[in-house]
């Protein structure tokens, strides 16, 4: 077995992944004594040392790396498992780092369906729901209680309600003086909600209280799947939409939200993490006019793809169901309906993606991974 090698700035440790270099400051910060067991917060400040930490000696004892520091009378015992994780992944273990499962048109029967009663009372079901929202970006909660407090009870099982310009909740039904096209009987083009906000709401809940109208099918698609298809079919169009920000707004008498967003969001590894799209809340483009000569064709191509049957899932919202989806990834819309043919009333609200992941991590740590799924399938009418 190779030995630990000390240098001026760090050390090389023999690990399963091979010899791996760790910086001394990082190792000192990784010492378990840096975290207060009561508050679970960091109580060590590397900047409080008179000089940067430097190891005097280091050895492996059992499943720990033991470091004697030259710069202070401190011995650190760092779990090798932590070093192995960083050697393999480059970052800490994260149970919420669940790979996205891209989905296409026809996928509706595979959406997770789970009852409100189960979500609220069974941590296993709550884990299934939160995991599905991370992996698929969408799930359907069935058997919602019809009372006023039903939606907040469901949301709070996942995270605190995030307010928007509309307040804590919004009602989607025909209004006399609508503030949003959603509040009319007209068709609603495929969109993500509130891109004019600096950070658009993360997770959206749409609780169907009543739906007896003709038409008005709900439309959903996986924006990440469409973006990946665009990358495959037209890499230059993908690059234009992923690299440039365009303006969105949300404007009325008492508010004037404006923000620039990338239509395709990618992470540092270039993977698609989401999309932002909303023609009805899109402001006048302010990219250089010559750039628009290539940007607009790419943008229009992406918008047209979002109308294709290969991506879009359609189903009728049933009273008592609540569709929950990632507002940064799942693009939704609605077909028009005949306003006087019956009643259609959806109540919505939001929580954020950070709260969703937090809830999943806590459940996963308790052993509820949400991997087993109920086999109930979606009724698409
Ligand atoms: Fe919407």
Image: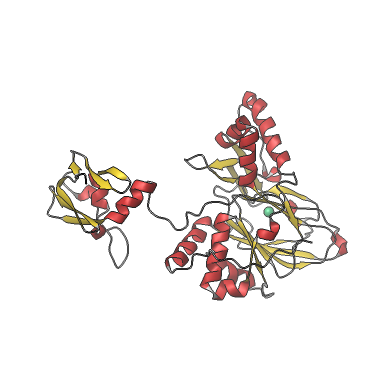
The residue that appears at 53% across and 56% down in the rendered structure is 353
- Corner quadrant of residue 12: top left
Residue 302 at x, y percent in the picture: 68, 38
- In this view of the protein, can residue 179 be seen by the observer? no
Q: Considering only vertical position in the picture, is 3 above or below 116?
A: above
In the image, 110 versus 315, the foreground residue is 110
- In this view of the protein, can residue 365 be seen by the observer? yes
- Corner quadrant of residue 262: top right
48 with respect to 369 (left or right):
left
The residue that appears at 74% across and 44% down in the rendered structure is 307
Quadrant, the C terminus? bottom right
How many marks the image carries: the answer is 0
Residue 194 at x, y percent in the picture: 63, 50
Return the residue found at the far top: 290
Q: Considering only vertical position in the picture, is 245 above or below 48?
A: above
In the image, 89 versus 349, the foreground residue is 89
Q: Quadrant of ligand 1?
A: bottom right
Residue 57 at x, y percent in the picture: 14, 48
The residue that appears at 66% across and 59% down in the rendered structure is 110
Q: Considering only vertical position in the picture, is 361 above or below 260?
A: below
Residue 160 at x, y percent in the picture: 53, 64
The residue that appears at 86% across and 58% down in the rendered structure is 338
């Amino acid at each position: 077995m190779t030995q630990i090698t000390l240098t001026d700035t760090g050390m090389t440790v023999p690990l399963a992944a091979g010899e791996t270099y760790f910086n001394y400051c990082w190792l000192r910060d990784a010492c378990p004594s840096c975290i207060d067991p009561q508050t679970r917060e960091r109580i060590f400040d590397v900047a409080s040392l008179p000089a940067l930490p430097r190891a005097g000696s280091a050895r492996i004892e059992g499943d720990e790396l033991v470091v004697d520091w030259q710069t202070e009378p401190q011995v650190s015992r760092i779990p090798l498992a932590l070093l192995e994780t960083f050697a393999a992944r480059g970052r800490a273990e994260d149970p919420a780092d669940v790979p996205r499962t891209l989905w296409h048109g026809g996928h509706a029967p595979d959406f997770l369906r789970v009852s409100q009663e189960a979500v609220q009372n069974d941590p296993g079901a709550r884990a299934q729901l939160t995991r599905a929202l991370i992996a698929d970006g969408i799930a359907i909660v069935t058997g919602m209680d019809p009372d006023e407090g039903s939606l907040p009870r469901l949301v709070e099982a996942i995270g605190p309600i995030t307010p928007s310009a509309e307040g804590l909740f919004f009602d989607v039904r025909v209004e006399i003086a609508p503030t949003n096209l959603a509040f009319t009987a007209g068709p609603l083009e495929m969109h993500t909600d509130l891109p004019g906000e600096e950070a658009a709401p993360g997770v959206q809940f749409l609780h169907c209280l009543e739906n007896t109208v003709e038409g008005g099918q709900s439309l959903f698609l996986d924006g990440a799947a469409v973006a990946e298809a665009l990358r495959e079919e037209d890499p230059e169009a993908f690059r234009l939409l992923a690299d440039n920000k365009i303006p969105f707004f949300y404007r009325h008498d008492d508010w004037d939200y404006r923000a620039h967003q990338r239509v395709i969001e990618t992470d540092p590894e270039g993977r698609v993490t989401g999309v932002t799209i909303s023609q009805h809340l899109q402001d006048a483009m302010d990219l250089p006019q010559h750039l628009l000569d290539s940007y607009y064709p790419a943008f229009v191509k992406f918008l047209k793809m979002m109308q294709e049957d290969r991506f879009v899932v359609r189903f009728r919202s049933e009273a008592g169901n609540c569709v929950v989806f990632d507002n940064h990834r799942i693009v939704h819309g609605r077909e028009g309906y005949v306003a006087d043919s019956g009643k259609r009333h959806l109540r919505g609200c939001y929580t954020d993606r950070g709260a969703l992941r937090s809830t999943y991590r806590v459940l996963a740590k308790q052993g509820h991974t949400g991997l087993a799924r109920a086999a109930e399938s979606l009724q698409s009418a």
